[in-house]
Image: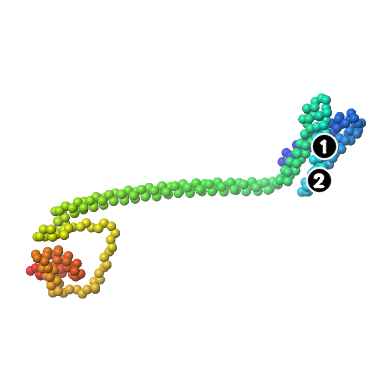
C-alpha cells in the first residue's frame, strides 16, 4: 500500500531533477563554462534532495519543521522558475519546455501527499478491527430494521383484527337497536289503541266509563332499584287484621273493588302479606 504513493513521488522527483540539471547545463553552458553550469544544476537538485531527505527523517520520527518545509518548497519553486525562464528564452520548442516546467512542483506535491498518507496510515490489525466494527454496526442496523418491519406488520394485523371486531359489534348493536325500536313501536301502537289499552289495563273493565286509568309504557332507560324491604320491618298481620284491611279497601268505593284493584291498593298502602294469605282473606270477606 505504501508503494502506491511513494513510487510516483520518487519517479517524479527523479525526472524533475534530471530535467532541471539538463536545462541548467544547456541554458547556462552558453554563458559560463559547462562545469560551472553543472555545479549550479547539482546545487539546485542537491538542495532540493537534501531538504526532502530531512523532511522524510522528521516525518519518520513523527515530527515536523516548518523552516525545512519552507526551504524545500523554495528549492522546488527555484527549479520550476529555471525551467520556466528557459522555456521563455528558448528559440525552439518553447511550448514543450514550458509544459514540463511544473514537474518540480508536482514532485513536491506528491511527497506532500505521501506524507499525509503516512500520518493517516493504520496497521492491518487496526483496519481489521475497524472493518469488524463497521460490519457489526451494519448487522445491528439490519436486525433493527427487520424488527421494526415485523413490529409494524404485527401492529397492522392487530389493528385490522380490532377494527373488524368493532365493526361486528357495531352491526350487532345496530340490529339490536333496530329490534328494540320495532318492539317499542309495537308497544306504542298497542298503548295508543283504545280497546287494546283497556284490555291491557285490566281484564275486567270498570262500570263507569273513563274511570279506568291509562296504561303506560314501561320506562326504557336507566332505573333506580327499589330499596329492599326487610322482612322484619313490620310485624306479620293476623288473619283477623288482614280480613279487616281487605274489607276496608274493597268497600272503599262503590261498586266494590275487584281483587286485582284491592291487591294493588293493599300493597301500595305499605301492607305486606303473601299472595296465598291475601286471596284467602279475600274469599273470607266476600263470602
Q: Residue 58: x, y in percent?
A: 79, 47
Which residue is drawn at the image coordinates 9% and 60% (left, top)?
207
Element marked by disc 2:
helix
Q: Name the residue under label 1.
A: 78
Residue displayed at 21% across by 53% down? 187
| Residue 60 visible in the shown view | no
State left or right for residue 193 relative to residue 56.
left
Front in this rendered view, residue 33 or 60 = 33
Q: Where is residue 112 in the image (x, y as percent from the top left)?
A: 75, 41
Q: Residue 67 — which label?
A: 2
User: With 85 as the anchor, is 172 left or right in this view?
Assistant: left
Label 2: how many residues lie within 10 Å, few (<14), some (14-19) or many (20+)? Answer: few
Judged from the image, the secondary structure of the residue bearing numbered disc 1 is helix
Query: Where is residue 73 drawn, in percent x and y?
Result: 80, 40
Give the class, few, some or many, for how many residues have Cα within 10 Å of label 1's Cα (few <14, many ≥20). Answer: some
Q: What is the quadrant of residue 12 in the picture?
A: top right
Q: Where, quadrant-wise, is the N terminus in this rendering?
A: top right
Vertical relation: 263 (above or below) 137: below
Instruction: Judge whether residue 144 can be spotted in this image.
Output: yes
Amino acid at each position: 500500500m505504501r508503494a502506491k504513493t511513494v513510487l510516483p513521488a520518487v519517479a517524479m522527483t527523479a525526472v524533475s531533477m534530471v530535467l532541471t540539471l539538463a536545462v541548467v547545463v544547456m541554458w547556462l553552458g552558453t554563458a559560463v563554462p559547462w562545469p560551472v553550469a553543472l555545479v549550479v544544476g547539482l546545487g539546485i537538485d542537491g538542495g532540493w534532495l537534501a531538504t526532502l531527505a530531512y523532511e522524510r527523517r522528521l516525518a519518520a520520527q513523527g515530527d515536523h519543521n516548518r523552516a525545512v518545509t519552507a526551504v524545500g518548497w523554495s528549492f522546488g519553486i527555484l527549479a520550476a522558475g529555471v525551467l520556466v525562464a528557459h522555456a521563455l528564452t528558448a528559440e525552439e520548442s518553447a511550448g514543450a519546455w514550458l509544459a514540463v516546467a511544473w514537474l518540480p512542483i508536482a514532485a513536491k506535491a506528491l511527497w506532500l501527499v505521501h506524507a499525509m498518507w503516512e500520518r493517516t496510515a493504520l496497521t492491518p490489525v487496526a483496519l481489521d478491527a475497524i472493518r469488524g466494527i463497521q460490519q457489526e454496526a451494519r448487522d445491528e442496523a439490519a436486525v433493527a430494521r427487520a424488527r421494526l418491519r415485523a413490529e409494524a406488520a404485527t401492529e397492522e394485523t392487530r389493528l385490522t383484527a380490532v377494527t373488524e371486531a368493532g365493526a361486528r359489534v357495531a352491526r350487532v348493536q345496530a340490529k339490536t337497536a333496530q329490534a328494540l325500536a320495532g318492539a317499542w313501536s309495537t308497544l306504542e301502537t298497542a298503548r295508543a289503541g283504545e280497546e287494546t289499552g283497556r284490555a291491557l289495563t285490566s281484564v275486567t273493565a270498570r262500570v263507569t266509563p273513563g274511570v279506568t286509568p291509562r296504561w303506560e309504557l314501561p320506562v326504557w332507560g336507566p332505573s333506580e332499584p327499589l330499596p329492599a324491604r326487610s322482612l322484619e320491618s313490620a310485624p306479620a298481620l293476623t288473619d283477623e287484621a288482614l280480613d279487616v284491611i281487605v274489607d276496608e279497601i274493597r268497600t272503599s268505593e262503590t261498586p266494590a273493588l275487584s281483587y286485582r284493584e284491592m291487591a294493588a291498593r293493599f300493597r301500595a298502602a305499605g301492607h305486606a302479606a303473601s299472595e296465598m294469605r291475601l286471596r284467602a282473606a279475600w274469599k273470607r270477606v266476600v263470602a
